[in-house]
Amino acid sequence: MSLNENTAPARDDGLAGKVAVITGGASGIGRALAVAYARAGTDSVVGHYPGDPHSADETVRLVEAAGGRCTAVAVDVRDSAQVDALAQAAVAAYGRLDIAVAGAGVLRRAALAELDDDSWNDMLSVDLTGVLRTFRSAAAVMAGPGAMVAISSIAGGVFGWDDHAHYAAAKSGVLGLCRSLATELAPRGIRVNAIVPGLIETPQSLDETNSLGPAGLERAGRGIPAGRVGHADEVARAIRFLTGDDAAYITGQQLVVDGGLTVRWPE
């Protein structure tokens, strides 16, 4: 499914005029989400890792082609000051911040014997503590009700994945973080949820060294009830739903987007 396909909301979901911060916005789900928000009338500030081989400028181009506004900001989510500056950039550019989506993440393969403390700590600093930093900085500048979504994984809440213990631990921690913040921030009208993608075709999953790669994804897709792996656009639309008015009474929850993978009986 192309990012250029018209996937505008069927009706008003309250997102027009809102402003969103998206970390991990240079590619994959983050890029697809920025485009989905543009079609809903939401301005976005996309945070991208300074060394990301994917171009945040391309995200901006796609957003503008969809009729939206987007600002790209280089940010390392391991650095609290940089994450704080990202949230402040949204207010400076568009006057407010309503939505924060924590999508920045790394995926590296490491067997237990090779998993040293530095590798463990670096993974958690990006994939778990990076979510905390993103939400903390967003909450500090949100003037009214808002919505936050963190991208977890079925590896964090459902399946074990050999050689990825650090990744699974981080993604599992994201679920607990979202539940706790949902209760803490509810009095301010800020909803916090997690999206739990299954096998989605993104630059990360296409990496044969650290993930399944193209052939592995194709094989795995045949075992999914939907008959295929998912697309970044499909996860983006689920996030858009969670941050819109249709999800006004949903907080502290986990929305699994996996084509039925987690409910299939083993064959």
Image: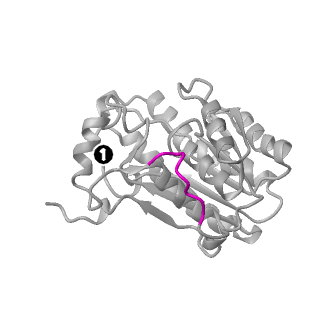
- Say which element carries label 1: loop
Quadrant in the rendering for residue 98: bottom right
Q: Is residue 58 above or below residue 227?
A: above
Residue at image mark 1: 161
x 66%, y 37%: residue: 60
Residue 74's quadrant in the figure? Answer: top right
Q: What is the crowding at mark 1: few (fewer than 14 residues within 10 Å), some, or many (at least 20)?
A: few
Q: Most extreme residue toward the left, as rendered?
A: 267
Q: Is residue 132 left or right of residue 29?
A: right
Region of the chain picked out in magenta, as a range: 1-9
Q: Position of residue 197 (x, y in %)?
A: 43, 54
Most frequent secondary structure within the magenta stretch: loop
Looking at the rendered image, the quarter that the C terminus falls into is: bottom left
Q: Is residue 53 magenta?
A: no
Query: What's the residue at 36%, 35% (across, down)?
Result: 206
Residue 29 relative to residue 207: left or right: right
Image point (52%, 45%), residue name: 3
The answer to which of 101 and 29 lies nearer the viewer is 29
**Horizontal and vertical percent position of residue 212:** 30, 38
Residue 8 rendering spot, x and y as whole percentages: 60, 59
Residue 221 in picture, x, y percent from top left: 27, 50
Front residue of 80/13: it is: 13
Q: Which residue: 63% across, 65% down?
A: 182
Residue 80 is left or right of residue 94, and the answer is left
Front-most of residues 161 and 46:
46
Q: Tag 1: residue type?
A: Trp
Q: Is residue 6 magenta?
A: yes
